[in-house]
Amino acid sequence: MHPYKHTAALILFLLPALLTAQTPVRIKVDLNRREGTLRPVWANTGHDEPNYTYSREGRALLKQFALACACTVHDRTHNLLTTGKGRPALKWGSTDAYTVNAAGRAVYNWKILDRIFDTYKNAGVVPYVEIGFMPKALSTHPEPYHSRWPKGPLFTGWAYPPKSYHRWGELIYRWVRHEVHRYGKQNVERWDWEVWNEPDIGYWQGSEQQYEKLYDFTAAAVKRALPEARVGGPATTGPASPHAAKFLRDLLTHCARGRNYATGKTGAPLDFISFHAKGRTRMVAGLAQMDLRQNLKDIAHGFRIVSQFPSLRHLPIMISESDPDPCAACSASLYPENAYRNTPQYAGYEAELLADTTALAARYRVHLQGYVSWAFTFPGHPYFYGYRSLATHGIDKPVLDGFRMFGMLQRQRVRATSSGQWPPGQLLRSHVRPDLGVIATRNGNSASILVWHYDDRSMATPAARVEMTIRGLPAQARRILSMQFRIDRGHSDAYTAWKAMGSPQTPTPEQIRLLKKAGQLQLLTSPEWVRAKNGTVKFTFTLPQPGLSLFRLHWTPAKP
């Protein structure tokens, strides 16, 4: 073994101890070392319950999420074609888009779908359209149909193949044509149309070949309605599972060179590739523990599979669910292993995920379009009940402030290193024990530097002392306006404020006002002017775990 490999391995082994000790973590940023583009791959959210979309809380949250970034944000939801009157429940929703009359003729009803997509339009959100699930009148096994999870089976009549693939195709064709008529061709061309959700498990009660047939008829219908539309899939579960990996490979092979069930020709339209990635949570010695490693394994396996198809590896990849655990509606109040959801730990996890997902995409040389955080809001449920959500009763959680920080990052990425940051390869092999990472960006006469302190364990570890050196400022820029935004248990954390109030489930109007204020992204200190010396500024600060800091620097451009 090369002698330096022993040293590197020792450093990685000792890294947690170094972070918890008082040895400073040293961050170095060079604003003149460009390192590619940082696209807003994080700017996507999703949820099971489509009828929550147009609720008062849903509308407000979508607007806040859209405001978090000067970019295009997307929302994905299940059950857009499920039969029912639009009454939401956990892991359930409906639109009644397709029924049949007494004569057996199709009846198309777009009223509830219009409410959902109008909400997107009004919030400035672009839909990421998941095509599913099976209307009752088309299902080959329609009874029982309504899912009553968690008191009954989740996978019921909506998860079965259609009685007629031609009727299914006609439904999809009419749906796409309706959206074009309502929102305009140029707008709908921007939407992604994804065929079904997780067909490798219970969400699809047919065979793999039947899914391929569904894909072909769906893609053909979408393209017939709007040739420029983008259609893809298969939205399989985590590719670290051999079964899921095989399903993804088989669908890619089918689209590349299989016989098309709808046209009889070779291959099927595929404009983007999607799969899912999930971490794990569990209780260890009485403490909740996350597992970022599992999330990254799914991502790495999916990227590797796509990279093995020369004719497809250029296609955009959408990880249409990427989350710390598999079940958004399994609350921390009932499942204590999900305790991270109300806390700054969730924001720290998302920072790690952003850094490591983009690093893995670069390693496998694939085109990462984005990933979806399967988290929204749950109207009508208790305050801070611990669902995987971005807000509760209109009160923002720390994770939403994390996304606000991400939205402040600019597109031009610059060189940034941290002596306390784990490399992605190491994170694929072990649990994260405190990691202190950094992403730096620049745009003209401003820069944004994101620093986070994260641990897979829910326990708080000692704060880290950080010494950050930023080089590459113009020589003329002697005075720099600096702002530091902070998320930790004392800042941008409505949950801690709520607990300090006694955890009220019927808060007073004044308490609600204070909680909403506590949930906003906060400055650690007032903006200040700092002096640069030889194009360099230095900051020394303490960062708790979990915690995130976002530094924003502005300087006056040099005169010509």
Image (spheres, helix red, strand yellow):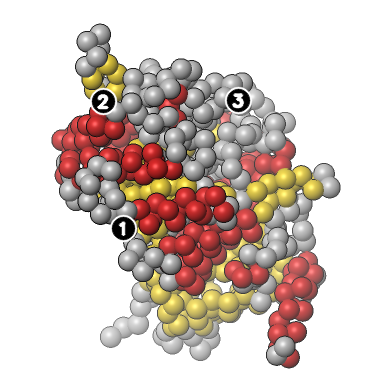
Which dot, 1 or 2, sits closer to the camera?
Answer: 1
Front residue of 76 and 468: 76
Of label 1 and label 3, which has the lower sequence position?
3
Position of residue 537 measured from the top left corner of the image (x, y, whole percent):
55, 79
Quarter of the image with the C terminus is bottom left
Q: In the current view of this chain or complex, which residue is farthest to the bottom?
A: 3
Q: Say which residue label 3 marks.
A: 150
Q: Say which residue label 2 marks.
A: 110
Q: Looking at the picture, does residue 193 appear above or below residue 441?
A: above
Three-letter amino acid code at disc 3?
Pro
Q: Residue at x 38, y 17 (%)?
A: 85
Count of number-bearing discs = 3
Task: Judge left or right: residue 152 versus residue 142.
Answer: right
Badge 3 crowding class, 10 Å Cα cut-off, few under 14, some 14 to 19, many 20 or more, is few
Three-letter amino acid code at disc 2?
Trp
Q: Residue at x 23, y 20 (%)?
A: 106
| Residue 257: mark | 1
Q: Quadrant of residue 98?
A: top left
Residue 326 visible in the current orientation: yes
Of label 1 and label 2, which has the lower sequence position?
2
